[in-house]
Amino acid sequence: MTRSSPAAIVPDAIPDLCLAEARIWRVWNALLGEKDNFAADREVAARLLRLSPQIGDLASTSHSFSQHVCEYLAMQEIDQFIDCNPRMTNPTHDTVQRVNKNARVLYVSGDPIELAHAQALLNPDHRTHVVAANIFNVKELYVRTDAAEYLDWSRPIALLLTGPLPLAPGTAANAAAIMKAHVDQLCPGSYTAVTHWLQPSTAAKRRTASLIEDELVSEFGAGRFRTRNEIKALFPDQVLVDPGLVQCDDWPMKTDGHKRNWVEKSSVGALGRKV
C-alpha cells in the first residue's frame, strides 16, 4: 500500500470557485446554520425553508447516521473508508480514528471549494487523503492512480454515500447503476453506507416533497425522493446489516421519546455488506 503525499492531491490553484452560483453541499451547510456558504447558497436555502422549515433535517439525520455507521465499522476492524460526501463538522476521519488511529480515509468531491475544505481537514500524515472526482462518474474515481494506490483494494473497504444519491442524475435506475459500478470495484466483505430521501406516506407531504424536488431540479438538475424499493435497489450484490433500511435516527436501533417530523421520517439509510 502506497503512502501518498496529501499536498500532491489538490492543485495549489483551484480554478473557478463559482461563488455566484449555488452549490448543493453549501446549501445544506446554510440550512444547518453553518458558515461555509455564500449569498447564492443562502438564497436557495431560503426558498427551500419556505417550502418546509424542517428541510435541513435531511442533512443532519444523514450525517448522524454516517457517524454511527463509521463507528460501528471501525469497531468491526474495517480500517479503510471512502467518503463521498465530505463534511467540515465532525468529519469521518475523526470518528474512525478515535477507534483505530491507523484507519485511512479517502475523501472524494468534485466541488472546488469543498475540495479546499477537505484538504484543510487532512491529518499531517498518510492517514487522510483527498481526490477530485465526480462520484456519479464512477470510472473517473477508480482510474485515478492516487486513489488506486492509497487503499489496499484486496481488503474490505467501507464506501460512504451518505447524502449525495438523491442528487444522482437521471432516474432511479441510473442511481442503481451508479451504485452497481461502485460496488463492482470493491472486494467481498466490503460495505456501502447509503442514505436517501424516502417518498412521504401522505398525499399532503408528497406534494411538499414534489415542490422541493422541483426547486432542486431547477437549480441543480437533480434531487429526488424515492420509494423504498428504489432505495433498496441501491445495494446490489449485498446483504443489509440489521436493522436494514430504516429511518436514519433508528440506526443502529430504534430510539424512543422523540416525535419526528415528516422530513426526519423521510430520511432513511442502510448499511450493506458485499457477499
Image: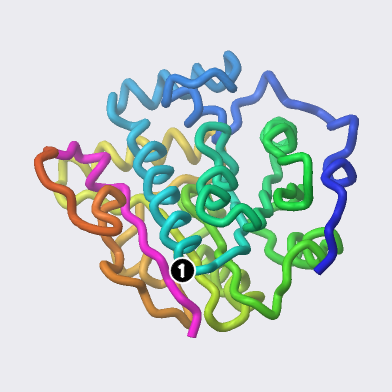
* Displayed quadrant of residue 205: top left
Residue identifier under label 1 = 76
Specify whether residue 272 is painted magenta. Answer: yes
Image position, residue 236 (x, y; %): 47, 78
- Residue at the extreme top of the image, as rendered: 39
Q: How many marks?
A: 1
User: In percent of the image, x 56 and y 74: which residue is there?
Assistant: 180
* Residue type highlighted by circle 1: Gln
Q: Is residue 116 above or below residue 107?
A: above
User: In percent of the image, x 9 and y 40: which residue is there?
Assistant: 257
Q: Image quadrant for the N terminus?
A: bottom right
Residue numbers of the magenta segment: 260-275
Between residue 67 and residue 192, name the one nearer to us.
67
User: In percent of the image, x 51 and y 46: which residue is there?
Assistant: 95
Specify whether residue 186 is painted magenta. Answer: no
Image position, residue 82 (x, y; %): 62, 58
Q: Quick check: 86 left or right of 45?
A: right
Q: How is the image coloured?
A: rainbow
